[in-house]
Image (cartoon, rainbow, N blue to C red):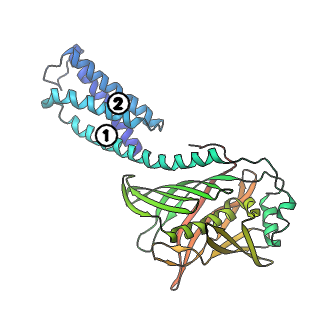
Amino acid sequence: MRIVLFLLLVCHALIHLLGTAKAFGWGNISQLTQPISQPQGFFWTFAAALFLVSAALFFLRKESWALVAIAAVLVSQTVIMLVWKDAWFGTIANALILIAAVLSLFASNFEHNYRHDVRDLLQATNFRTDTLTEAHIAHLPPPVQQYLRYVGVVGRPVVVNFRAQMRGRMRSRETDWFSFRAQQYSFIDSPARYFFMKAKISGLPITGYHKYEGISASMVIRLLSAITVQHTDSPELFKAETVTFLNDLCLFAPAGLIDSRLEWGAWDNHSATVSLRNGGTNVSATLHFNGAGELENFVSDDRYDVSENKTVRFSTPVSGYRDFNGYRLPSFGEAIWHYAEGAFTYGEFHIQKISYNVPKLIN
């Protein structure tokens, strides 16, 4: 679709140069039978230039392309109206470009909310410079210590935040799989998670923003980035997102497992239980490790399934450990609901990039 829109902008720009040529007598422009004055010709040229600038900005993925495109459509439609009999068909292209530009503005505004939230907390974050040592992990259960050594956190900076990029696919019990790409920022000292997703369902663009901050959580899903199809900010969602925050801590930022707000319970050679309290909400999970020290699964009975309106056992088996900026972390994971009738995998995640102690928003 990006290629189609880019070509439409360029071709529509070049067609406007026919009006320029007609106005200044450059050749025999038989496509335009009505006279075009030289002052009008300047506006045909101006419209062409605006469309070309918009195309260039669109190619460079600059959000400003939409505003330039709307200006181009306004100029274009004005000159088209003056020679309507010959150029009425240009209105079709203008309408398509206008729709795309308006939808782009809606998308930019929705994503701006996510970026604004991330920037605000980045500015308030205290970026520590101390190093994580063996003393930091001495109080942890032995399998957790082994995991942290395997991951490679000892001797590295204490983690205060991280940024992850991923792709994958998701579904519900009522819908088929759909692909998505997502970016998230998570903060440890002041628990927060900002997760922004872009997907297509039945060919239609869908965007979603999960926000977990302080003692509140919200989830907004929009069709075409303009029509809200789901908005949830219930206490049950906050508990669910607290489990997700703990899950991310274990998988993406294991250096954060030294946090004093975590309480460790029963453990053996290959498992340990952990709980996290935030805002009066307490959640727990059992971590399962293999003999190499890798975390293989995270299982919690505290995650609320919003679509089912009930708490359901939740697990995230992971695999494919590889290097991410010097840490050995899983590159693939699944999200599974364990219903009474059987396990249902609703998400598959391929981790592409993880960065730590990120001081500013990265586009």
Residue for badge 2: 51
Report x, y in % for residue 24: 23, 14
Task: Say whether disc 2 or disc 1 marks the residue closer to the N-terminus.
Answer: 2
Give the residue type that dot 2 points to. Answer: Phe
Q: Residue 256 has which mark?
A: none
Horizontal relation, residue 15 to residue 307: left or right: left
Q: CA distance from mark 2 to mark 1?
A: 10 Å
**Circle 1: is it few (<14), some (14-19), or many (20+) Cα within 10 Å?**
many
- Quadrant placement of the C terminus: top right
For the point 17% across and 23% down, the residue is: 30
Q: Quadrant of residue 312?
A: bottom right
**Is residue 272 positioned above or below 321 on the image?**
below
Horizontal relation, residue 206 to residue 44: left or right: right
Residue for badge 1: 97
Q: Are marks 2 and 1 in contact (CB under 8 Å)?
A: yes
Horizontal relation, residue 50 to residue 240: left or right: left
Report x, y in % for residue 218: 49, 61
Give the residue type that dot 1 points to. Answer: Ile
SS type, badge 1: helix
Report x, y in % for residue 62: 47, 36
